[in-house]
Image (cartoon, rainbow, N blue to C red):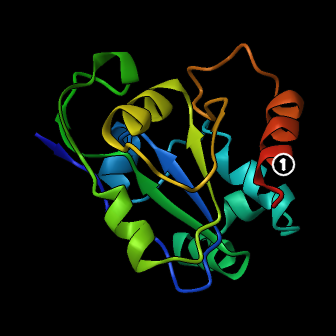
Amino acid sequence: MLKSFAPIINKNSKILILGSMPGIKSLEAVQYYAHPQNRFWKIMSVYCNYQNLEKENYKIKTSVLLKNNIALWDVIQSCTREGSLDTNIQNVKPNNIIGLIKKYPGIKKILCNGTKSYELFVKNNKNIEVPIIKVPSTSPANAKYSFEKLKDEWINAIHL
C-alpha cells in the first residue's frame, strides 16, 4: 500500500494544486514532484519568478510556493500501484480535501495536475464551491506537451 504525503499549506494559501499520487522517485525522496524530468518545479520557477527553482533544495522549493500562496497535496491518501503511471492506480482511499478547504478557507481555486487527479477529485468531492481546473499533467509521461505549451496553460490557470 502506497501512502501520500501531508499537505504543504498555510493560512495564506489561495491556490491548491492536487496531484494524484506521488510516483516512485517522489515516494523514495519523500518530496512532491521529485522525478528529475517532471516539469512541475520548472513551471513554478516561472510563475514564482524564482530562477532555477527546480535546482534548489526541497525546503526552499516549498517555502517559495507558500510565499506565493500555493499549496500542494494529492487527491489520494493511499492506493496500490505497480510503477508510477496513474493508469495503474487501484484500491484508492481519497484524502479529505473538503476538510482541508474548511480548515484553510483562503483557498480560492483548485488545480488538478492531470486527468487522474481531476477524475478522482470530482468523484470523491461533491458540492464543492471552489473553482476546479484540470491542467495538463507535468509528468514526463505527458510527452505530447512541450514545456512552453504546458507552462502557458499552467500560468493561465494559476492566475486568480
Left or right side of 106 for 154 = right
Say which quarter of the image contains residue 55. bottom right
Left or right side of 67 for 88 = left
Is residue 34 visible in the rendered structure shown here? Answer: no
Q: Amino acid at mark 1?
A: Ile
Foreground of the two, 79 or 58: 79
Foreground of the two, 44 or 24: 44
Is residue 4 visible in the rendered structure shown here? Answer: yes
Residue drawn 65% across the image and 71% down it: 14
**Is residue 90 shown above or below 29?**
above
Q: Tell which residue pokes out farthest to the bottom in this image.
A: 11
Residue 34 point in image, percent of width and height: 49, 50
The number of numbered discs placed on residues in the rendered structure image is 1
**Is residue 8 shown above or below 26?**
below
Residue drawn 62% across the image and 20% down it: 142
Residue 149 point in image, percent of width and height: 86, 28
Residue 116 point in image, percent of width and height: 44, 27
Question: In which quadrant is the N terminus drawn?
Answer: top left
Say which quarter of the image contains residue 13. bottom right
* Label 1 sits on residue: 155
Residue drawn 66% across the image and 68% down it: 56
Residue 43 point in image, percent of width and height: 77, 49
Say which quarter of the image contains residue 100. bottom left
Badge 1 crowding class, 10 Å Cα cut-off, few under 14, some 14 to 19, many 20 or more, is: some
Question: In which quadrant is the C terminus drawn?
Answer: bottom right
- What is the secondary structure assignment of the residue under circle 1? helix
Left or right side of 121 for 108 = right
Residue drawn 56% across the image and 20% down it: 141
Foreground of the two, 110 or 43: 110
